[in-house]
Each structure stands twice: as C-alpha cells, then as structure tokens.
Image (spheres, rainbow, N blue to C red):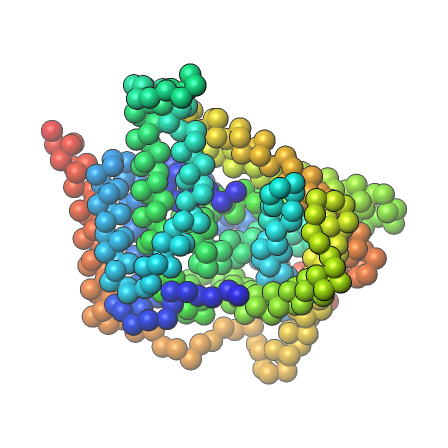
Amino acid sequence: MLQETFCSGNSIFHRADPRIKIILLVLYIFAIVLNNSIISVLILFVFSLIFVCLSKVSIWMVFKRLFVVNTFVLFLWFFLPFSTPGETVFTIYKLKASMEGITEALLITIKANGAILAIITYVSTTTIPMIGHALYKLGVSQNLVLLFLLTYRYLDVIFDEFSRMYNAAIIRNFIPKTNIHTYKTISYMVAMVLIRAYERGKRIYEAMLLRGFNGKFSSLQQLKLTKNDLLISYLTLFSIVLSFVPQYICYLR
Amino acid sequence: MHISEGVLSPPLLIAGAAITVVGTWIGLRKTRPKEVPLMAVLTSAFFVASLIHVPIGPSSVHLVLNGLIGLLLGFGAFPSILIALLLQALFFQFGGILVLGVNCTNMALPAIFVYILFKKYCESEKRIHRLVSGFLSGSLSIFLSTLLVAICLYLTGENFTAAAKTIVYAHLPVMIIEGLITAACIDFIYRVKPEMLKIDEIGAKNEI
C-alpha cells in the first residue's frame, strides 16, 4: 500500500549521494521560504519544474501528488483575498477581495508547490533506508535513525494486520456510519493493532538480539561523492543565487 | 492540520525546530537501543491509525490520536510523532521539511500535556475514571493542536485570523470523535493488556 513512487529510476538525481541531496534540499527550501517577491519565487518554481523533468519521474504522478497537497493552500485561498486590507479588485456579497490578499495567496501557492516539487526530486528519489543511512552520516542520533528505519520497516506489516481485521469486520456486515457502534468497533480495532504491535515490538528486539544486534547501526552501502553530485550542487546553488538577484536589483535602485 | 511549506515566517520555523530538537532529545535521552524496536512498531501502528477514515455525517475524518500517543509513550511522543511526520512528508508530501519542526511541535506538545495531566487517571481501577480521562485527553489534545496551528497562522499575519478561527471551529467534531476513540482504546488496553500502559516508564526502570 505504501509505495515509494518516485525512488526507482536512473537520473542525475537518483544517482546522487543522499547526503548531498538532503543538504541541498534544505538550502533550496530555505531560499523558497526567505524570498518574498513573486519573481524570485517564480524563478525557484521554474527551477523545481526543470529538476522534476531532469529526474525523469512520472509527471502524471507528480501532478496527482500536487493536487492532494494543495488542499491546505486552497483553504487559504478562501480567506486571504478577503481578509487582507488593500485595493479592492472584486466583490462577492459585500466581501471585498483585495489585490494584496490575492498576491499573498499566489505567493504561498507558488512557494508551497515549489517546495513539494523539490522534496519529490531531492528526497523522494532516494529509498527510505538510504535516507536513514545518510541522516546517520550527517550526525543524526543513532537511536532516532534506528527508530526511523524500523518504523518504516514495520509500516506494511502493521497495515496488513489492520486490513485483515477490517476485512474480517466488513465480511461480518460491519457498515461504518455515524454512530457509537462504529466508533467503538474502530477503536477496539485500533487498540488491538496497538496491542499486537506492542507484543511484536518485544519479539523483534529478542530476534534482533539473537542475530547479534549490539545497538549499532551499520549499512553495507558505501557513500561516495562523484562528479554527478558536483553537477547537482552547482545547479541548485545557481538557482538559489539567481532567485536572490531580483531582490538585489531592487535594493540597488 | 499539516501546515504547508512556505506559509510560515522563518522565526516561527526556527522556534518550532528548536522545540522539536529539545523535545526529541528529552524523549530519546532515556531510551536505550533495547526499547527502540518497541517504540518503532508502535509508531508505525500510529501511522497506520492515521490512515483510517472515520465517518462523520456525510463526510469522514482521519484519526490523529496524538492524545493516545502521549498517554502510551509519554515523553517518547516527540520522537515518535517526528518520525511519523517525516515519513508522511516523504511518502505523501504532506507538510514539508523545514516546517516539520512546527508541525511536530503542534502535535507533540499537546500529547505531552495530556500525558502529564491524565496519565494517572488512565490506570485507575474505576472504569468511569478511565473513560472520562481518555475522552478528555483525546479531545483536549486535538483542541490544543488546532489551537497551536491557529496561533502559528495568526503570528504569520493579521490577515490569517479568519482562516485560523475556521480551523479551530472545523475541528470541533473531530475533537469529539477523537475523545470517544481514545477513551475506548484506553479502556480496552487496560482490560486486555494493562502492562502496556507502563511503556512510558521504560528507561526509568531497567526492564521492559
């Protein structure tokens, strides 16, 4: 059920070192957050689009993701144009939409979508175990990385367990409705999944111990920097610098 | 409830990240490698629970259960919620990377708050105590979370006030459902596996 939709493929982004990708992503999103003019943010958005094309992921899947993510942004569109004071553009039932409000909503839309595209190209092109390994190499605490990797490992197992229980309930004519019976049934299922997870968690530790687990985190994969990493670093840094140029020009004037 | 990237101002992002780092540090300080698998499997269970949609009237809402996370894991709620949100950002692109700190703080602070307030009543022998404290932790944690989201939006700009208020009102039905489900879960766990309510003490003792 949980698929890493974008991580298979062969492009400059897929081949890059995950450590470099994480650092670049953080810098890039910092640039998106710090820029506050439409032109700068648009430059970054266009670069995000170019990166998506370079990473050769399915464009259709990317747009499906963007659609879901934009619900929060859409929610803001219902309020911001009307609650920001400024020059009135149009009126709906005494509600005045201001130019400033529309500009701000537009700015947020571009920023949010640019950031999502960047997350897809930089980290969703990496498998989760590799991200965990890279985080560890970047100095994240070992326990946290272990927690991250094991949580990822058991998502599917727990999901299967819940689905099995839910299907059993459906077969026995459980129809979810707005009533106490439904809430009670669902909470008992959730509680049962938690209890089984608890027991499984203890068994897992014992099994790990039997196989020589000593609390250390090790990976067979070696991380190496290549020319490819330099290439995407230059690309990213170039786009970040370029996005600050319009502001600099305004400042000079 | 996830705030998207690019909405909040840098000072808020930094504040959220700082609180998350401190919270996660406190949560992990007492955790030894021994307890990590247990926490991890419970975190994935909470992740799966957050994918469950519960019908309400013509629509449906998905569970959050941060109150239950708080009651079960105690201070471990911070690392657990952080990992769940990170995985959501990586799998579904919900939320974001820089805004992760703020989103995690919004969810985990109320979880720890209800843990401190209600934990001892959840282990009470009287059923009514367990049900009432479970309901209050479930609904209070959702209320505080939405309140924190609203405060974040309000601090971003005056013009976000209307949106912030709407978020709080829209979550009132969710509060009731979360309360009911948390109460039933706590009661069920108490009757079926009472030792599970002691996980938050790991690290304090030597044995799980």
Q: Which of B13 and A180 is in front in this view?
A: A180
Residue A140 in sight from this viewpoint:
yes
Q: x, y (%) of residue B39?
A: 62, 62
Q: Residue at x 21, y 45 (%)?
A: A43
Q: Is residue B102 above or below residue A127?
A: above
Q: x, y (%) of residue A126?
A: 38, 67
Quarter of the image with the C terminus of chain A in it: top left
Q: In this view, does B168 lie to the left or right of A40?
A: right
Instruction: Specify the farthest residue to the left.
Output: A253
Q: Residue at x 57, y 76 (%)?
A: A214
Q: x, y (%) of residue B116?
A: 70, 43
Residue A131 in sight from this viewpoint:
no
Q: Nearer the viewer, residue B22 or A126?
A: A126
Q: Is residue A20 above or below residue A111?
A: below
Q: In this view, does A227 lie to the left or right of B36?
A: left
Q: Which residue is drawn at 41% across and 54% down?
A: A65
Q: x, y (%) of residue A27?
A: 30, 51
Instruction: Specify the farthest residue to the right.
Output: B126
Q: Nearer the viewer, residue A87 or A32?
A: A87
Instruction: Specify the farthest residue to the bottom.
Output: A211
